[in-house]
Image (tube, helix red, strand yellow):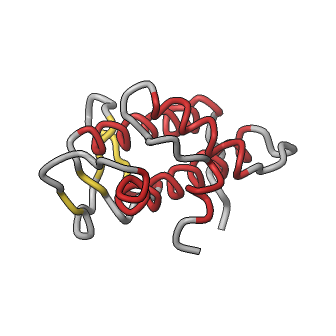
Amino acid sequence: EERVRRKPAFYQRIIHSSIALLIRMHQQNVSHNHFHRRNIVFDKNGNPEIIDLSMAQMYTKPPSNKIEFLRRNAWDLQAVTRIVGNLTQRIHPNTDYNYHDFTEQILMEYRKYLPTFGVTAIEIMDFGQ
């Protein structure tokens, strides 16, 4: 089976959409809990959407501390880190996949919109292990 070669812009779009969609969901107090690349689709206008909310959980209020934040959001943040890492490798095949650096970059973007209660990339990476 021959693999379709995609342009870097395609992968960049998925990377940015993944992070933006995750932030938007968490702003609405929703954890997806099954976040991966195949659950991001684009409508006819090219706008990204999330599908498969079968494992999603909605909360009545935002997390109020680090432990609550990790319980609700670590799985989704780990998933987005895997998406970013895998797609970055497709754009730059000779780049080392540094999970910690990708997690830290995503947290920096996330912190612009939502509180993280001082959670670190290592705490995200280690949660649930």
In the image, residue 72 lies at what x, y percent? 35, 59
x and y percent of residue 49 in the render?
29, 43
Residue 91 in which image quadrant: top right
Label count reads 0
| Up-down relation of residue 114 to residue 2 (above or below) | above
| Position of residue 111 in the picture relative to residue 65 (left or right) | right
Q: Is residue 40 left or right of residue 14?
A: left
- Quarter of the rendering occupied by the N terminus: bottom right
User: Residue placed farthest to the top in the image?
Assistant: 112
Position of residue 13 measured from the top left corner of the image (x, y, whole percent) = 50, 32
Which residue is farthest bottom?
129
- Measured along the vertical axis of the image, is residue 15 above or below residue 129? above
- Residue at x-position 61% and y-position 65%: 126
Relative to 5, 47 lies left or right: left
- Nearest the viewer among 19 and 5 is 19
Residue shown at 46%/34% (left/top)?
110
Can you say which quadrant of the picture contains the C terminus?
A: bottom right
Q: Which residue is the extreme one toward the right? A: 94
Up/down of 126 relative to 20, above or below: below
Q: Position of residue 53 (x, y in %)?
A: 24, 62
Left or right: where 87 falls relative to 42: right
Which residue sits furthest front? 65
Please tell me which residue lies in front, 115 or 39: 115
